[in-house]
Image (tube, rainbow, N blue to C red):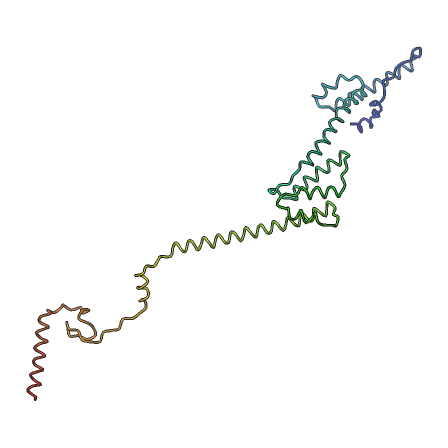
Amino acid sequence: MLFYLTTLNLARFLSEEVPTLKEGGQNAESVSAVEAWNHSDFLCRNYVLNGLADALYNVFCEKKTAKELWVSLDRKYKTEDAGAKKFLVGRFLDFKMLDSKPVISQVQELQLILHDIHAEGMTLSESFQVAAIIEKLPPAWKDFKNYLKHKRKEMNVEELIVRLRIEEDNRNIERRLFTLNVAKANVVEHGDKYNAKRKPRSSGKDSKLGAKKGTFKKKFVGKCYNCDGMGHKASDCKKPKRAREANTVDDISHDVSKISVQLFLR
């Protein structure tokens, strides 16, 4: 607004007092000068009012001159600026980094607060900013924080951010590798359990049968007593079974005949 009033050659009316006519000197020239000043002051005052919000216009429209209006606005917003400074300092002191958010993004948020503090005219040294950022690192970065504290070489904010970015990238890589290894271990363990469930349990009887697998039965080479055939036993014979008594009588008579022949030959 001040720049706009300066381009219109009206900025001086923000600080000038209203001119008054001296007694006895009310000539036409003095009266016209006062009227010209009042007209310019009227323009300046309304330009300022036109730049206000509707709610503020109703509050400040009662001011009679541009200077009175400008002083009221300056007093109001200078007080608010002082409150804004305290608010920024409070934000900076209360700022804490969390493990759940990326460290670099939180450092950038802190840098914005520091930038606003500098914009308000409050200067902080580079060393103080570096120490503050290190101190506000999240709990999971405790070891790295102690490492940075014990470094003797001074760093600026940019160098610190580079170190933090490298450390965060390394942590992200380690976290991804750990997650991948855990996933592989879970897959292997699940597969072993699944195979163990599917594998049948062998009993003692089954194990004995299994031990006999692959053995060959020796072929019978004698005579069958049922059909007199060769190469199989009577129990495996496919022909009808002969009566046991008849077989016994035949065997006895056959033996008697053999004995008689032997006696006769003698």
Which residue is drawn at the image coordinates 70% and 37% (left, top)?
113
Query: Which is more toward the observer, 74 or 124?
Result: 124
Which percent across, then down, holds residue 92?
A: 69, 36
Which residue is drawn at the image coordinates 7% and 86% (left, top)?
263
In the image, taking residue 167 as reference, residue 204 lies left or right, namely left
Q: Quadrant of the N terminus?
A: top right
Return the residue found at the far right.
24
Which percent across, then down, holds residue 23?
A: 92, 11
Which percent across, then down, holds residue 54?
A: 70, 21
**156 up-or-down from 121: above or below:** below
In the image, taking residue 114 as reference, residue 28 lies left or right, namely right
| Residue 67 in which image quadrant | top right
**122 up-or-down from 102: above or below:** above
Which percent across, then down, holds residue 251?
A: 10, 76
Return the residue found at the far top.
24
In the image, taking residue 160 as reference, residue 43 lies left or right, namely right
Which residue is drawn at the image coordinates 42% and 54% (left, top)?
193
